[in-house]
Amino acid sequence: MTKFSNYVGRFAPSPTGDLHFGSLVTAVASYLRARSQNGKWLLRIEDIDQKRNQKGSIYSILKTLEMHGLEWDDEIIYQSQRSEIYRFYLNYLNEKKLIYKCSCSRKKLINYYKNLQTMEYIYPGVCRNKEIENKDFSTRIKAFNTFNIKFTDNIQGSIEQNLEKEVGDFVLWRNENIASYQLAVVVDDEIQGITEIVRGSDLLFQTTRQIYLQKCLNFKTLNYAHIPILLNKENQKLSKQTKAEPLKNLNAKENICKILNYIGFEEFIINYLNKNSKNSIELINNSVPYFDLSKINKVISVQFE
Ligand SMILES: [Zn+2]
């Protein structure tokens, strides 16, 4: 039986389509990081927004992970089954008078300033002291400007954000009556005992929101490592929206070699590993001792070729 260290990592895909190269880079990086620390690697399906889920895509994601030798520990968690848990923590924040109902429409939000780094609107808290009669509302948390939130990302370095000025009060419960991404992710990371999150740098500036929520909920603060996201020729993030091609499972070994190149492995090591591994499962596991977080490019994005 394997004895694990205290390290717990995770991969948390949304089942909105097949995995593409960009998402598999994140999966491989977080897997190798966890295994190189003798830690567990957990899997969570972020399927809370059921309108966006695509039929068959959970099966296809699990299949792709398996074919690439990415074996997860423990049971898979499905966010769509956890609404009551998220509701419990929302109620806790309500008792602390940290949240309020907001009836602003999307149309109204465009009147507010935009954060030019994240291209999100900064919600200035106009509904904080209103009585909301309307049945159609979302729930926001008050982001007080008491201190700047700082953290040291294990790849990107020191990050600092003033929530009130740069983000504004953000949504915890959506008007479709489901938990927001921010609330669900913070609750699940705490309950699953995650110690470090390795994910794409498109989420770098959401991290301060999550740290703030952890503090409000008396959860521990986690470690973070944001890897560069891959851009296509038009400088867009590889994603389902930008029509990134789905991965071919039959090329699993080749795919992993290509990914190792993006996460700091030197060419001669990749060649050595490739030659000495019979298949993708051997390749990924032989790669573990050579993984070094400090060798990953300290940039937000890189061109995919
Ligand atoms: Zn409002």
Image (cartoon, rainbow, N blue to C red):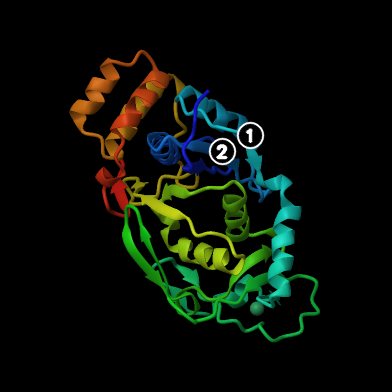
Q: Quadrant of the C terminus?
A: top left
Q: Is residue 138 left or right of residue 58?
A: right
Viewer-nearest residue: 175 or 155: 155
The residue most toward the top is 278
The percent position of residue 216, horizontal first and vertical second, equals 59, 69
The quadrant where ligand 1 appears is bottom right
Residue at point 62%, 60% (across, down): 183
Local secondary structure at mark 2: strand
The percent position of residue 155, horizontal first and vertical second, equals 32, 52
Res 263 quadrant in image:
top left
Residue position marked by numbered label 2 in the rendering = 43
Residue at point 51%, 42% (across, down): 10
Give whichever of discs 2 and 1 has the lower sequence position.
2
Local secondary structure at mark 1: loop
Assess disc 1: are there few (<14), some (14-19) or many (≥20) residues with their C-alpha within 10 Å of its C-alpha: few
The percent position of residue 196, horizontal first and vertical second, equals 45, 49
Residue at point 56%, 63% (across, down): 214
Is residue 176 visible in the rendered structure shown here? no
Compared with 205, 10 (above or below) is: above
Q: Is residue 19 left or right of residue 153?
A: right
Report, in whole angstroms, how far the alpha carbon at label 2 lies from the one at label 1: 8 Å
